[in-house]
Image (cartoon, rainbow, N blue to C red):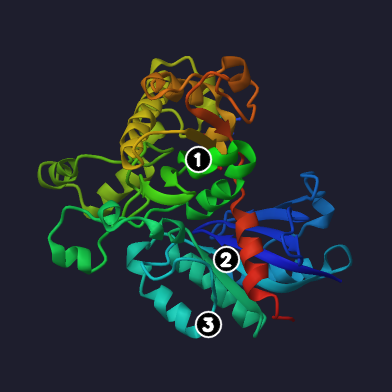
Amino acid sequence: MTDAILVLNAGSSSLKFAVYPNEAGAPSPFLRGKIVGIGSDPVLSARDETGRPLPQDDLIQLDPGASHDALISVLLDWLDGHQGGVSVTAAGHRVVHGGTGRTGPARVTDALLAELDDLVPLAPLHQPHNLAAIRSVAARVPGLAQVACFDTSFHRTQDRMAQMFALPRALTEAGIIRYGFHGLSYDYIASTLPQHLGDRAEGRVIAAHLGNGASMCAMRGRRSVATSMGLTALDGLMMGRRSGAIDPGVLLHLVEERGMTVDAVKHLLYEESGLLGVSGISNDVRVLEASDAPEAAEALDLFAYRAAWEVGALATSIAGLDAIVFTAGIGENSARVRGAICARLGWLGVTLDPAANERHATRISTAASRVDVLVVPTDEEGVIARATHALGVTGRR
Ligand code: AMP
């Protein structure tokens, strides 16, 4: 049996997992995979430590319509029997919301679960699935050490000013504030800055997490000073399907003049907008880059315009800019999007090296550029695995 830490990221229709050796600072998982299509036709896929997909024979058939709960049991059983057996000694979970109180990862207790239940109204699309996964594991393996790692924690270093909306005070006091998200990704990026930037790592850095969900974080001293997402993950940048920041008057107009229901507006903003809505073609940058349609090009241009705009705004919060770090699916892979963003940032001291950008080099700015521009693959699961090892090593099946 191999002692292991199981990292889980439970969404509405998917369950992503990664399995790490139970060692301090274990750098990479020996197994990584996902179950997609939960609720309809779930399918398990997994890759070994080299990134090679496991052959179909090593996987299992999942029952159509199986619940999240049942699938977590199936996953644990499968791990038990995988390659001589994987003994899960602790589980770490991505939990979207830790409220104002959670400034770092926390060992799961009944009291913590109750506290996190209270935050469901702040993240109704994600939090229930994250918490259900914790409860499923606890039911299946009573007493197993579990650790919750929050997407909001990294931003709790921000000044009050950066977290406030200009709303009546009572709403602020009731928790209607900017929480920010993608904190596990920013935590990882912050941890890598010294190796790339030396002393400048402690300076003024903007990390751009550009994936299907997209946000930016302005850091100083490798701590969050401001971020583009707010109360929800809808604010800030244009995203794959989400609108990002929008005049709140548009929402009033849609309801009052067009008679849209709240659910219809929600669907419009979360599912039908962003790259998909503007292009009318796809939310996927790969598809848009391959398309000749002018709408595809316009969607990519708007994405870059909005991102560059946000860099300008965030640079104000840290009084200048020493480095930009691109990460996540688009940030790591799209030279075109990075190029279009950086082309708008010459006034801030950004000079891109086009050849380095094309080959996705770690440093894509010229030697003369006042601002260092980096491409750093993110590793949210690694952050969770290390936190889980640090806080949860004692539990045993
Ligand atoms: P993430 O949410 O971080 O997994 O990012 C997913 C998104 O990254 C996809 O929807 C694509 O838009 C984008 N992406 C992934 N691979 C590439 C690629 N090779 N080139 C351009 N965009 C990519």
Q: Label 2, label 3: how many angstroms apart (C-alpha)?
A: 13 Å
Query: Which picture quadrant has residue 124?
Result: bottom left
Evaluate if marks 1 and 2 touch, with contact meaning CB atoms under 8 Å apart.
no
Residue that badge 1 annotates? 211
Nearest to N terminus: mark 1 or mark 2: 2
User: Horizontally, is 253 left or right of 263 in the view?
Assistant: left
Q: Quadrant of the N terminus?
A: bottom right
Mark 3 Cα-neighbour bin, 10 Å: few <14, some 14–19, many ≥20: few
Asked which secondary structure carries label 2, the reply is strand
Mark 1 CB within 8 Å of ligand 1: yes
Residue that badge 3 annotates? 109
Decide if residue 64 is in sight here.
Answer: no
| Count of numbered circles on the image | 3
Nearest to N terminus: mark 2 or mark 3: 2
View quadrant of ligand 1: top right
Asked which secondary structure carries label 3, the reply is loop
Q: Position of residue 175 (x, y in %)?
A: 26, 66
Q: Position of residue 239 (x, y in %)?
A: 41, 38
Q: Position of residue 114 (x, y in %)?
A: 42, 80
Q: Is residue 384 above or below residue 377?
A: below
Instruction: Name the one closer to the observer, 206 or 42.
Output: 206
Mark 3 CB within 8 Å of ligand 1: no
Amino acid of disc 2:
His
Kindly identify the residue that appears in the image at 31 percent across and 43 percent down. Answer: 268
Mark 1 Cα-neighbour bin, 10 Å: few <14, some 14–19, many ≥20: some
Amino acid of disc 1:
Gly
Q: Label 3, label 1: how many angstroms apart (C-alpha)?
A: 32 Å
Q: Position of residue 30 (x, y in %)?
A: 78, 55
